[in-house]
């Protein structure tokens, strides 16, 4: 992306348009205009996604790696956590499995769909791609530990029958999740920052272009936050329509959660795809694996607090089929990203696992 000295009008108009659509929805425009307003909501959502990617790239170019990828990952996850917590508070005990379903969908989408597509796209254009093995290994080790502790272990504890933790166990796991994620961020940004830095390609305009002015970067940071809030709220507004469509075609309701998670992750997914296509697979993997870690490391402690305060039982353990797919994904990711080099083979394997995940969700 070529950095200019001013922001294009469409990147500023997109979050404003999303805000107007949400205001109209609150005023009853959705009921008045029906399917036509739904089309506008979809257009506003994807416009917000594209604007978020644009502003994220400006902020990332200003602050440098790996801070840029961390900013986008934490921003998206923080808003996602706020949405989940608000839905839990509004829905009561009937939504105690919402965090588990959302986090599991996000991990599967990122670990297989996003990583697989980025590897395949990058390898298809550049042949073999390389990345820093130490940073990716640290991310995978942390992701494996935090995923199993939060979504698999609850099925096998005996203080309370699975798939739940007792109150003391839940509090302990929430602290452990924060410790793991916090340590990873410390390693990524301070102690071993060089593990996560991409090798600058010769002639890469995105890397070698001068950084944008500070004022422009601050405006983009604000616009990025506005875009992400708009994307999440529009996704939430569209979820009832989505649920009706899913029920109409006879698919399980779990598909709604997958679609919403995919929409929320679109800004990171597009940014990671662009980086892989530009032969910056390190940046792409920083985005993908960092997003998966943030999704668990921030969501689980937040919903644990809600559960402990309200007294609701939080269902965290995933079923046997999901456990098999999660463990398979972690093993394959460790093997395919364990050499520091990728080809179309690794990308194809990840995408096949993602296709199996989607297929067995629709036809369990």
Image (spheres, rainbow, N blue to C red):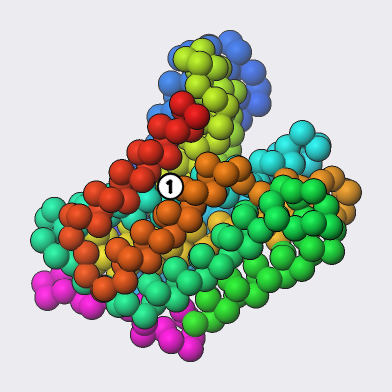
**Rendered location of residue 217, percent (x, y):** 41, 66
Q: In the image, is residue 323 above or below residue 145?
A: above
Q: Residue furthest bottom?
A: 191
Which residue corresponds to the image point at 45% horizontal and 76% vertical from the top-left? 138
Which residue corresponds to the image point at 48% horizontal and 56% vertical from the top-left? 327
Let me know if residue 186 appears in the view.
yes
Which residue corresponds to the image point at 56% horizontal and 32% vertical from the top-left? 254
Task: Answer with left or right where residue 117 lies relative to residue 329.
Answer: left
Label tally? 1
Which residue corresponds to the image point at 36% horizontal and 85% vertical from the top-left? 194
Given residues 269 and 29, the one toward you in this image is 269
Task: Answer with left or right where residue 155 lies relative to residue 43.
Answer: right
Given residues 232 and 341, the one toward you in this image is 341
Q: Check if residue 263 falls in the magenta segment.
A: no
Secondary structure at badge 1 equals: helix
Position of the N terminus by quadrant? bottom left
Given residues 130 and 42, the one toward you in this image is 130
Let me know if residue 222 appears in the view.
no
**Rendered location of residue 141, percent (x, y):** 48, 72
Q: In the image, is residue 338 above or below residue 249?
A: below
Q: Check if residue 206 falls in the magenta segment.
A: yes
Given residues 311 and 334, the one toward you in this image is 334
Region of the chain picked out in magenta, as a range: 188-214
Q: Quadrant of residue 154?
A: bottom right
**Rendered location of residue 225, percent (x, y):** 52, 54
Q: Which residue is mark 1?
A: 109
Task: Answer with left or right where residue 172 lies relative to residue 277.
Answer: right
Q: Residues within 10 Å of mark 1 (few under 14, many from 20)?
A: many
Task: Answer with left or right where residue 273 lies relative to residue 295.
Answer: left
């Amino acid at each position: 992306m070529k950095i200019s000295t001013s922001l294009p009008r469409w990147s500023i108009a997109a979050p404003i348009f999303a805000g107007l659509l949400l205001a109209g929805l609150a005023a009853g425009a959705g009921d008045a205009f029906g399917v036509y307003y739904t089309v506008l909501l979809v257009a506003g959502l994807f416009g917000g996604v594209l604007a978020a990617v644009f502003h994220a790239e400006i902020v990332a170019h200003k602050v440098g790696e790996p801070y840029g990828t961390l900013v986008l990952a934490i921003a998206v996850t923080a808003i996602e956590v706020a949405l989940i917590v608000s839905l839990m508070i509004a829905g009561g005990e009937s939504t105690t499995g919402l965090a588990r379903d959302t986090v599991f969908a996000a991990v599967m989408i990122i670990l297989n769909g996003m990583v697989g597509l980025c590897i395949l796209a990058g390898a298809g254009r550049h042949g073999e791609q390389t990345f820093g093995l130490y940073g990716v290994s640290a991310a995978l080790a942390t992701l494996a530990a935090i995923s199993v502790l939060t979504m698999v272990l609850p099925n096998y504890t005996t203080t309370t029958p699975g798939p739940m933790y007792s109150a003391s166990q839940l509090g302990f796991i929430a602290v452990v999740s924060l410790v793991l994620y916090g340590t990873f961020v410390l390693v990524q940004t301070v102690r071993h920052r060089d593990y996560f830095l991409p090798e600058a390609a010769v002639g890469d305009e995105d890397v070698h272009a001068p950084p944008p002015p500070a004022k422009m970067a601050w405006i983009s940071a604000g616009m990025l936050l506005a875009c992400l809030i708009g994307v999440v709220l529009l996704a939430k507004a569209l979820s009832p329509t989505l649920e009706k469509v899913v029920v109409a075609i006879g698919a399980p309701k779990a598909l709604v959660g997958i679609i919403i998670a995919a929409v929320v992750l679109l800004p990171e997914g597009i940014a990671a795809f662009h980086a892989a296509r530009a032969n910056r697979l390190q940046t792409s993997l920083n985005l993908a694996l960092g997003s998966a870690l943030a999704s668990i490391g921030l969501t689980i402690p937040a919903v644990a607090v809600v559960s402990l305060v309200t007294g609701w039982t939080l269902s965290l353990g995933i079923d046997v089929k999901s456990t098999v797919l999660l463990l398979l994904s972690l093993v394959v990711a460790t093997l395919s990203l364990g050499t520091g080099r990728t080809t179309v083979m690794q990308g194809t394997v990840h995408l096949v696992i993602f296709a199996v995940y989607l297929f067995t969700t629709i036809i369990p």
